[in-house]
Amino acid sequence: CSSNSKSSLRMSAVEKSVTAEEINSRLEAQLLKLKAKDATSIALSKEDLKIIHEDEHIIVVDKPAGVLCVPGKENNPSLSQAVFDAYGSESGRADKMVVHRLGMDTSGLIVFARTDKALKGMNTLFRTRKVTRSYEALVCGTIEDSEGSINLPLMRDYEFPPYMRVSTDEHQRALIGLDVEDVGKKLLERPKESLTKYEVVGKEELEGNAVTRVKLSSVSGRTHQLNVHCAAIGHPIVGDKVYGINGEAAANGGLEEGTLSSRASTEAQESIASAIGDKSMCVHANTISFEHPVTGEKLSFESGAPF
């Protein structure tokens, strides 16, 4: 590497670098937006709950979009509270039923523990990756390959905190000089290896725009992984107001452009965003399989996507 190219690398890193004050100011503004959004979480009654499976130890629920899984600091309406109010738990606490979560805008299958034994067992199953899950999504444009994998490391986005982006050497260099005490340890964590597998289920149209129905499997289970990876290949999830076109996070998962040659054009993505409007994001947790945390019975559940 010549001294000239080294200095140009340093220059680009310096140009990209940001101060702790800038990061914290952006984070604060974004957290206020998220707080306002969380406050719109829908309250569910027992009648509203779509129960897929119920026994004395666990409950499997088909979550609608637009509902938080947990109430958060503001005690917003949540699925966990609705399930607790309707079915109760051994611990007498709603938070002791939660073993995994789905994003507010994601619909689909979610498991709650009713007993302490089930809570411990489910936590172990998730930690040891013994739970198999898949998602169904509509993505912008036409994916040409019938299947594929997306292997791109993820990092917290210092330009658009608290969101994620694909990690690159340049963006890692921009973090040099920042202090954990000033920006928090999450932002300065090492890039996380992340792998998503996809299968094309069908090619469809949304108000004249090409979209692709895909089955997605998150092998590594990182925060917002499916959203960032789909955006990074140039086929963001339809209705994704964060990682999609003109969203709150970096475009294309933080890359210059989508990595697949089949990537949806900016015009197509904007047309789809306009067609979907304020409707929910098109991603649904459609299958989940695991061994019952108490009985050891093999369980598998499926739910059709609402889109």
Image (spheres, helix red, strand yellow):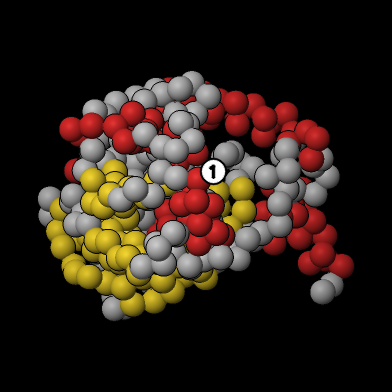
Any part of residue 263 in sight: no
Picture residue at 41% right of the left edge, 67% below the top: 296
Describe residue 263's horizontal placement relative to residue 280 as left or right. Answer: right
- Residue 251: percent from left, percent from top: 46, 49
- Residue 209: percent from left, percent from top: 18, 56
Q: Which residue is mark 1?
A: 163
Q: Quadrant of residue 299?
A: bottom left
- In the image, 143 versus 223, the foreground residue is 223
Picture residue at 40% right of the left edge, 43% below the top: 114
Q: Quadrant of residue 292?
A: bottom left
- In the image, 288 versus 9, the foreground residue is 288
The N terminus, quarter of image: bottom right
- In the image, 100 versus 227, the foreground residue is 100
Q: Identity of the amino acid at label 1? A: Tyr
- Residue 106: percent from left, percent from top: 34, 46
Rendered position, 294 above or below 279: below
Picture residue at 42% right of the left edge, 53% below the top: 227
Picture residue at 19% right of the left edge, 57% below the top: 304
Secondary structure state at the residue bearing disc 1: loop
Label 1 environment density (alpha carbons within 10 Å; few <14, some 14–19, many ≥20): many
